[in-house]
Amino acid sequence: MALGHEIEAVLGTHTLERGCDLVDDVVHGRVYGNPDGPIVLVLGGISATRFVCDAPTHKQGRNNRGWWSRLVREGGAIDLNRFKVIGYDFAPNDGGEACPETITTTDQARRIKALLESQGISKVAALIGSSYGGMCGLAFSRDYPEMIGQLCVIGAAHRPYPIGVGWRGIQRRVVRLGLDAGNPEAGLKLARELAMTTYRTPEEFADRFSLTETSSDPIQFDICDYLGSRGDVFAANMDARRFLALSESVDLHRVEPESISTPTLLMTAISDQLAPLPDMRELRDRLSGPSELFTFTSLYGHDAFLKEYDAMEPRLSAFCAGLV
């Protein structure tokens, strides 16, 4: 099991891109692997944390693995024997009344820069970002090209897809209804249930569930039980206002591909509904630096980056083999 150590950068209160303040900001990161190796920054979706390879102490038990430990491990595609890997916590760190109304991928990129500079790091060999982390990686490459050698973006494009913006808008309205009713957890739970139907594919659910009735009062089916369990887990680990800020950040994301000259590998599941193949092809074609698009089939849609390790590992291994 990989054990990391904590790093941080204290930024204090500062003004974000769209004018609101992030109060008493501390950027949290976690470092793994070879302390003298090429540096790889790994970012995930909005619920991912700096714990890429291990679990927080208070959550350790039978399963101490981090959110991407299948790929970031000793001997893995992102080999901890060779690389120094850094995980990062997206802002805002906390919810509550101090949570900013609006944060952008540009703001996240600025915090990543501050975290690296606090450790005396002037350049990373690569940034590998999935989902929202891929959006932040694009913003970082645009704004700080001198600080990155190569970029890998999985399941993220230069802009959000319109139907995804609509789905997330509904989710945010559900969460706000929960907040207004004094039950934010219920709002988060329902929003996550809806989100799961956009992350995955109809084909996966058709293969997985038989529509077995599991309750008669109210009527409930096996697929409803599954979605409810995913909502419960999410609501136990995410603050409502933090979710609103991060969900909105996805929808505000805009990067002009021509502004990015970093050599870039794009990866996507063909079934991804949130970063669809036409958008990924457009991103590839418009990037000003060398670029490649690697596609693979999956029942898991947007969640493929958390599921399709066998499909991704060979291409990620080849990507990492070229890092110096």
Image (cartoon, grey):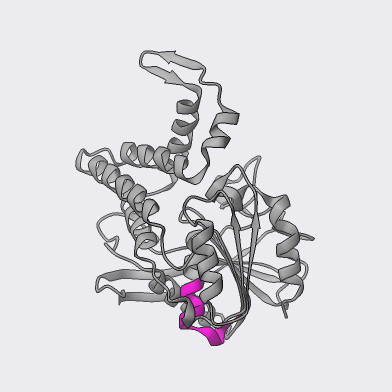
148 magenta-colored? yes
Q: Name the residue at 44% across, 74% down.
A: 111
Q: Nearer the viewer, residue 90 or 64?
A: 90
Does the magenta run of residues contain 50?
Answer: no
Image location (x, y in percent) of residue 144: 49, 83
Vertical relation: 20 (above or below) 51: below
* Vertical arrangement, residue 224 with respect to residue 100, above or below: above
Left or right: 143, with 129 as reference point: left
Q: Which residues are magenta?
A: 138-149
Q: Left or right of 269: which side holds 240?
A: left
Give the residue displayed 56% in from the left and 48% down from the top: 271
Give the quarter of the figure containing the C terminus: bottom right
| Residue appearing at x 45%, y 70% in the figure | 27
Count numbered badges in the picture.
0
Across and down, in percent, residue 218 comes to 36, 16
Q: For this rendering, which residue is in front, 51 or 171?
A: 171
Q: 45 or 98, which is in the foreground? A: 45
Residue 269: percent from the left, percent from the top? Answer: 60, 53
Res 77 seen here: no
Q: Main secondary structure of the magenta part?
A: helix
The answer to whether residue 73 is above or below residue 16 is: above
> Does residue 40 appear anywhere in the picture?
yes
Res. 186 image quadrant: top left
Q: Residue furthest top?
A: 216
Could you tell me residue 229's position as x and y percent?
48, 32
Q: Quadrant of residue 73?
A: bottom right
